[in-house]
Amino acid sequence: MGMFEDFRFSLLGGFALSLLLVLAQDQTGFISLDCGLPENSSYSDPTTDIYYISDASFVSTGAIMSVSPEFRTNEVRQQLWNVRSFPDGDRNCYYIRLTAGVRYLIRGTFMYGNYDAKGELPVFDLHIGPNKWDSLNFESASAVFYKEIIHVPSSSYIHVCLLNTDSGTPFISALELRPLRNNTYVSESGSLALVERADTGATGSQIFRYKDDKFDRIWSTESFSVWTSLSTPLIVNAGQNPYEPPSVVMSTAATTKDTNTSLDFYWDVPPNDNSGYYIYTHFAEVEELAKVNQYRAFNVTLNGNFWYGPVVPYYLYDFTVYSPSALTGGRYNFSLKRTDNSTLPPIINAVEIYKVIQLLQTETDQEDVDAIINTKLMYGVTRNWQGDPCFPQAYMWNGLECSSGSGYNNTPRITSLNLSSSGLTGGIAPYISNLTMLVSLDLSNNSLTGSVPDFLSQLPSLSILKLEKNKLTGSVPVQPNEKSKNGALLLSVDPNLCSSASCKKKKSIAVIAAVASVAGLVIVLLLTTAAIFWSLKRRKRKEMRQFTYSDILNITDNLRRPLGKGGFGTVYHGYMDGTEVAVKMLSPSSAQGYREFEAEVAIY
């Protein structure tokens, strides 16, 4: 048992004591996007009953395409009938809001299906945030590729990006996110990309997923000719095992054809791959040994060295054996050998293998990301504004400069924003106030209106401010004027903008004119007071709340009942805390719609 102590292996079984979050057998927290499904469309998959919606609300680029007719058959799942193709831009990204700190299984599904009628299999990269996740290299037009990663987002959003590598047009068929328990699939660093998830005891070519697996993990069959299979028609219970491999998978087990033969399996690491790997082995006894006076126990070795044991599987209860530390090496040979007092050969029901993906590039500060995305939506900026604003550096958003973040504790920040000559209209975006590390702001040569906001005085590092050639009115706040005079700020504004001092004279004239209308002023004050009182009362009663996409799905019962469609998008019926509500969805394509939508939200 010394090796066991050295490697600190963990055993989680039906009789282990642990506090678990009990999840209902439903789709709570699931995000299921059929990429290329027309906007506002949805359906329930007839096999899995998973509720899929269009991806249109999560991505602002790409073209909807259908696979060739020979691939669009009843034998092919509906999620593979369409794709979203990205012929334009080097990087195109999905932006999905979720819960920070929660462990998610993120899965992209891809089938080429000759959707572009070119018969040319593309090669492209897949990123999660600013970091590379994997590459796609297709074997045939009908091949279905699943790319899975288990990841804990540090922010309340995630970017899943497809990068053009000049080897064909990127595309995607489906994108799915599934919350997992936070005490499962824990790695010392990085995230875990799926290498293999196998039902080792099954004898056919079945694939199991939700509803059999409450976390919607996809289990394929894997067996060897030297193995044989055991099975039970009874339910195999997870007990206190937080991994909860599905009963249908655990009700079969692989074993050897004779008692004295070891049960062996292995996998090879690609050349020059120094990544760490995690393996999860799942066991359950499927034979009632007490009735036949038999006993099953075995040890597990890795590359000839003791790994764990003895394993004594529980009857109809599963447990999981894994290493909390990543394995390293070129080939992994696992061998399960019966102990001397065992009367039966070893078994294994299922196995999972994951590769560690080191996400070394830190994502841009979340407040900066929220601010720049809201600014993008308000002004309708297109450019190359996709994915993380600052990194990878080759894909930094045009018009931005950032501090160089690296490692895990140096978060990139936006230091310069240049939107000059961008056709901007409306006022200066209030979200810029949250870009607290801005050194330079250039909004010149647009059609901006309104006054120069006071929040520009509160940006502590701002040393360059260019607002000339706009339609701004009023005065420049005192602090920027003072900083400009002492050389701390390079300020460029149109000459019609008065300083705060010169504007005071104009204001005094306005006050004299206002005194001549005392009765009107009294009415205005009364109305204003009433409005403020009503607003404060309403605010006291109901604070502004933010909702994740999962919350919206729960409120609207998966967007099942549309009430109609307005200028902003579709309105859905729902219930929140027992109250009947209408949920208005904003289409991301209209900048004017965003401003009007935001104003309407403020009213409520």
Image (tube, rainbow, N blue to C red):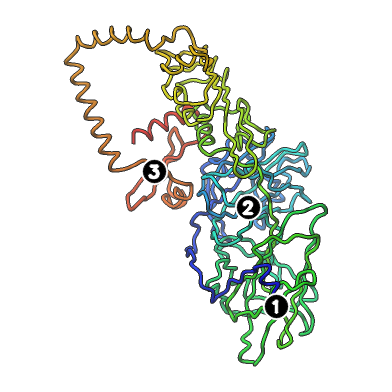
Callout 2: 10 Å neighbours few (<14), some, many (20+)? Answer: many
Please name the residue shown 42% across and 29% down the image: 596
Label 1 secondary element: strand
**Horizontal placement of 349 versus 468: left or right?**
right
| Disc 1 residue type (three-letter) | Ile
Number of marks drawn? 3
Q: Which mark is residue 58?
A: none
Q: Which mark is residue 545?
A: 3
Image coordinates for residue 475, horizontal then vertical, percent = 40, 13
Choose mark 3 or mark 2, whichever is in front. 3
Please name the residue shown 39% across and 47% down the image: 573
Image coordinates for residue 105, horizontal then vertical, percent = 59, 55
The quarter of the picture where the C terminus appears is top left
Query: For the view shown, which residue lies furthest in the left direction?
Result: 519
Q: Mark 2 and mark 1 in contact (Cβ < 8 Å)?
A: no
Mark earlier in primary sequence (1, 3):
1
**Horizontal placement of 329 versus 406: left or right?**
right
Task: Return the residue at label 1.
Answer: 347
| Disc 3 residue type (three-letter) | Arg
Image coordinates for residue 233, horizontal then vertical, percent = 60, 79
Task: Return the residue at label 2.
Answer: 107
